[in-house]
Every structure is written in structure tokens, then in C-alpha cells.
Image: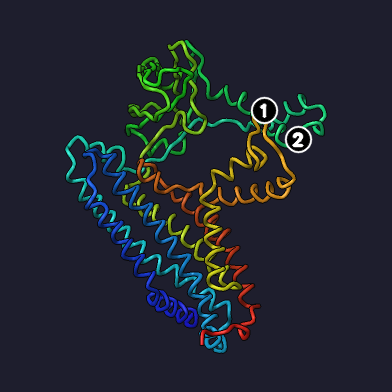
Amino acid sequence: MNKIATIVGLTWKAAFRYRLFWVLCAMLAAAVVGLPLLIKDDGTAQGMVQILLTYTLSTTAALLGFATLWLSCGTLARDVEECQMQMVAVKPIARWQIWLGKWLGLLSLNVVLLALAGSAIFVLLQWRAGRLSPDQQKILREDIFVSRASARERTQDLNPAVDQIMKRVVKDPSTMNGFDRAEMRRQITERLKAQYTDLAPFKSRLIGIDLHTLQDRLRNQKLQLRIKFQTASPNPDAQFTTFWRIGPTNSSNPVELSETFPADSFQEFTVPPNLVDDQGHLWIEVGNPNDVNLTFPLEEGIELLYPESTFGVNFIRGLMVIFCWLALLASIGLAAASFLSFPVAAFVSLAVLFIGLSSGTVATVVEQGTIVGYDASKGAYGHTVVDIVVLPFFQGALKIINLVESFSPIDSLSSGRSIRWGQLGLAVAQIVLLLGGFFCVVGIFLFTRRELATAQGNN
């Protein structure tokens, strides 16, 4: 451990020697402190949070991510190119210890920088919150400076039913190409989903949310019902009335509400306490008195929000998820620098980062089954021989990207959603241990087999 600690210290010293590091630190300070002080919000809680939380945390993650990639490539590749690594490698220290020491050095440096930036953001949040009007401060305390988890109706797995329908409909799968099969499967899945998402005119649907594990904790507490629905109405300003009956199914005195909301926007209203039945279920019956169909998306249509922790604890967990991203970037940069020169390693690392940021394009190509796009003359998507090679690569890349992008701490913090300890543990497992561990193993393997004696110094 003493040998690794020495490499950690040397990594810190190497980082301080880079002018770019100090430039990025200055930019980080300007983004975290200068931006909130210079830019005025619109006086609302949402506007204040948009500037102080969303912008500053996004900028912090971007700057630290770029600095991590640059330093991870430079601290290893340049040590080899400038013949400094050759002097270290002849010491009684294994190469895996050198590599691991540099990785831990970058991680510890990110811990300090992220803690300083996070502390500054949190203090400025509290300071700016005190300058809001009393009404906006109430909104801030109740809707944003909270840590609310969510529960929703459990739906059965649709894949077995989709498989049965596909076997019944498609007699000869060899007559269909990959895109046609995927499109048919998507259409069948959407039809089956309609039983959970669509509410026909003048109809109602009963929804049960299982809260038996939270029943004691949520006793005597007001909850929030968060809804979002879509319609086929051509009027974007239209308002739609919904009827709600909340409480046990055998209750003689349930809570009945009539709420009017616009479509395609999140809305919340309060659910009184003590409405969970003896089995720990909260029953919600929603009625549609309109002459148009209401569609509640499966993932975000109807959610029950309940307090899980404090905003401060949630903020720390959000920073820890960002730290997981930085740990992955450090392992990618060091893995590239283990066998490439500094310019090439930086280019490869940034290319990997660019692919990760292009998840929308990658997902579109996978969904369409081609990189060509839509052919208007044929009325279908075109296909080329290149798709045979590109599509498997994009499919694998999308699965890896989803492992990282499934965690969105900035969005959760700005909307008052809880980042639970289980989610944080999953982030550590998927991002740091699985993906980061893979790049660490690859980087150490390549670095231990690299011939350092052939590296030429800049004499």
C-alpha cells in the first residue's frame, strides 16, 4: 500500500504541473460560483433551481469529465514518452501497482474537486433560496428540496404473451427480415400495453399500488400523486377533467376528487393519509369523462411519491453517482494510455466519450435496423451490407451506454426525486466495478506487457 500511495502522490504532482488542469479549475470555479452570482433567475423556485442546480452540476460533471480524461491519458502516456516511467519501473514496484496508483490518484483528486464544487453549489442553493418570496420558498421546500421515492402499479411481463402472438401470426419467420420482425413485435407489444395505459372515453380503471413494505413508515403522512397523460386532441391548450376515487375498495367513505389538467405535462396533487388497506395496497380508480382517449404512459403515467430522505442526503448521493462516471472515465483514459501515445490515447478516449453522448443516434439506428435511414421512394427503411457489421456493434454499444445512462442524478435532484441507496449501489456495481473494472483489467494487462525500453524521450 505504501508503494501505491507513493504513486498516488506522484499523480497529484503530475496533475498540478499541467496548465490545462489549472485552466479547468478556474473554469470550474467560474461555473460553480460566478455563474449563479451573475445570472439572475425569474424569481421562481424552478428558475432558481434550473440555474443553480441543473446548470452548475451539468457544467461541473462536464469539466471534471474532460479533465479526468486528459489527465488520465497524460499522466501515463507522457511519463512513458518522457522516459520517466522507465525510472519508476526499475524500482521494486509491480506495474499493476503503478497503474492502480495512478487510477486511485485521479479518483482521490476528483473526490476533492467534486466535494469542493458540491459544497459551493449547496451553500449557494441555500443562500439563493432565502431570497425567494415566501410562496416560492414553500414550493421549494415541498417540491424540490425533498427526496421523494416513487411507487407505481406492478404490470406483468408482456414478453411471454408477445412471443405467443408472434408464433401464431408469423408462420414462417424466414420470410421476414430483422427490421420487419422487430417492427411487428413492437406493434404487438404496444397493443398489449394499451390495457395498462389507455383509458377510453367515459370509462374508469382501478389501479393498485403495493405499499405493504412501507405501510408503517407512511402512516399519517400525506402523499403526492404524480400523473401525466397524452391525448389525440389537436388543441394544445385543451384541459381535460379526470375523476379520482382513492381508498380501500370496500370503504364507505373514500376520497373522491375531480381534477382538470392539460395533456403532455406532469401534474401533482395531494393524497390524504391513511388510505392504505389492511393488505398494504393503495387503490386508485381513475375515470375519464371526456370524449377522447387518455393515455397514461406505462413508465411515468401514474406514480405515487412518498418522502424517502432529506435533500442534503440526496444531494450527496447524486454527487456520488457523478463520481462513478468520473471513475469510469479515468479507467478508460488510463487503459488507452497503457499502449498508445498521448495524442492517440486522448483521441481514442474522446471518441469513446462521444459515442456515449450520442446514445440517441445509436438507439435510433438499432431501432430502425439500419444506418441508411428512411427511403421515401420505397416507403421503407433502406438496408446495406454495412449494416451486417455496424448493427451488432451499435447494439452492444447501446447496452453498455444504458448501463451508465440509466442513472440521472441531476434530473432527479432538480425534480426532488430520490436517488436511493440501492440505486447508488447499482451505479457503483455497473459503472465502477463492471465497466470500470473491465477497462482496469485491460489497461493493466496491456501496460504490464508494454516494452518501455523502446519509448523515445524528447531530447
Q: Secondary structure at mark 1?
A: loop
Q: Secondary structure at mark 2?
A: loop
Residue at (49, 54) in percent of width and height: 425
Snapshot colouring: rainbow
Q: Position of residue 370 (x, y in %)?
A: 67, 41
In the rendered structure, find residue 177 and report the number of the disc placed on it. 2
Q: Position of residue 123 (x, y in %)?
A: 24, 55
The amino acid type found where label 2 is placed reads: Asn
The amino acid type found where label 1 is placed reads: Gly
Determine which quarter of the picture holds residue 141.
top left
Q: Is residue 161 visible?
A: no
Residue at (38, 43) in percent of width and height: 308
431 left or right, relative to 37: right
- Between 145 and 48, the one lying in front of the other is 48
Q: Which residue is mark 1?
A: 379
Determine which quarter of the picture holds residue 64.
bottom left
Q: Is residue 48 visible?
A: yes
Q: Position of residue 323 (x, y in %)?
A: 43, 59
Q: Position of residue 198 (x, y in %)?
A: 53, 21
162 left or right, relative to 215: right
